[in-house]
Image (cartoon, rainbow, N blue to C red):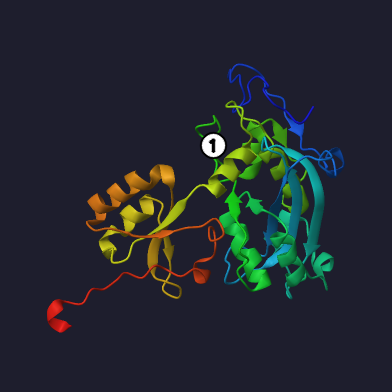
Amino acid sequence: MNGLHHMPGIPGCSDTRSSEPRILYPVRNRAAWPRKAPEGQQVRRICVIDTETTGLRLERHQIVELCGAVVSVDDRDRVVAIEQVKAGLVDPGHPLSPEIAELTGLSDADLAGRSICPEQLVAFLEGCHGVVAFNAGFDRPFVEKHVARHVAVPWGCAMRDVPWRTLGFEPGPQGYVLAQAGYYMPNAHRARDDVLALVELLDHVCADGESVMAKVLAAIEAPAWRFEAWGAPYGFKDELKDRRYQWAPERTHKIWHKHVRQADFRSEYRWYRQTIGKRPMVAPLLATERYRANETWVPKQPTVSVPDFLR
């Protein structure tokens, strides 16, 4: 049986009776997955990725462990094979904090002298049709910091690109969402374990008959835009923050911005005009540009018109 699907009492499945007991099954290990898709089957190669870092701040911290699994996805958007799993460690050049050592189980001795070749990592990513992380807004900036350049491959985010509540889930960390799908992670906060858990979650079939992977790939292919709040008065910062706009600080752009999807475009545009009193600057946001660090994308500068009498 390919995972746990349509079990009573599991959100996102066909029967969500809350009175039913829930049974959690362990995430499949590497050996449980085929290495190749069935002969002659057309598939897309998707890289499922996870990083462990020395901390949360991109400007101060760095990757200490990275894992990527290349999965074969068929025309039903189901994972039919894990072609390869690549993992590596990175010596940060200083001792790990006690908190990170406890969280990841890594020690300074584990990391001593270890590295991940940036060029090999770029080739690994570029060999796939897309990249999926649970929290792409965290992982992509650290990956591109490690390789010291932008890698123009489409990225999807299982946390933000999936309408979890619509599917009967309560959004939250990966392990929490995974448990609602009927699985648990024997180990967590090591990149390889987190990647295998994410593959399991992506292959989960929801009550509407589509896999989680289908939701992410559809979001990758769908149009999106970045709303940029140029000229928004300082007094509206709380309204923008409550509306989930993010702040790109002065050393980058000094601007509030938001990733807006097609279904929300009209309502977001209307809210902005009614609340801020002007139009937002709207820039198309290709899948190859989404979830990048603020320092690496270029804002759409407002056009300043020159009065006729000054021409």
- Closer to the camera, 58 or 291? 291
Q: Is residue 128 visible from the viewing direction of this image?
A: yes
Q: Position of residue 98 (x, y in %)?
A: 71, 62
Residue closest to the far right: 31
- Closer to the camera, 162 or 129? 129
Left or right, 19 with reference to 192: left
Residue type beneath disc 1: Trp
What is the quadrant of the N terminus in the image?
top right
Q: Position of residue 285 (x, y in %)?
A: 47, 58
Q: Which residue is mark 1?
A: 164
Q: Position of residue 230 (x, y in %)?
A: 32, 66
Helix, strand or loop under label 1: loop
290 lies above or below 179: below
Q: Is residue 160 visible from the viewing direction of this image?
A: no
For residue 63, what is the image quadrant?
bottom right
What is the quadrant of the C terminus in the image?
bottom left
Residue closest to the far bottom: 310
Which residue corresponds to the image point at 28% horizontal and 47% vertical from the top-left? 270
202 lies above or below 181: below
Residue closest to the far left: 309
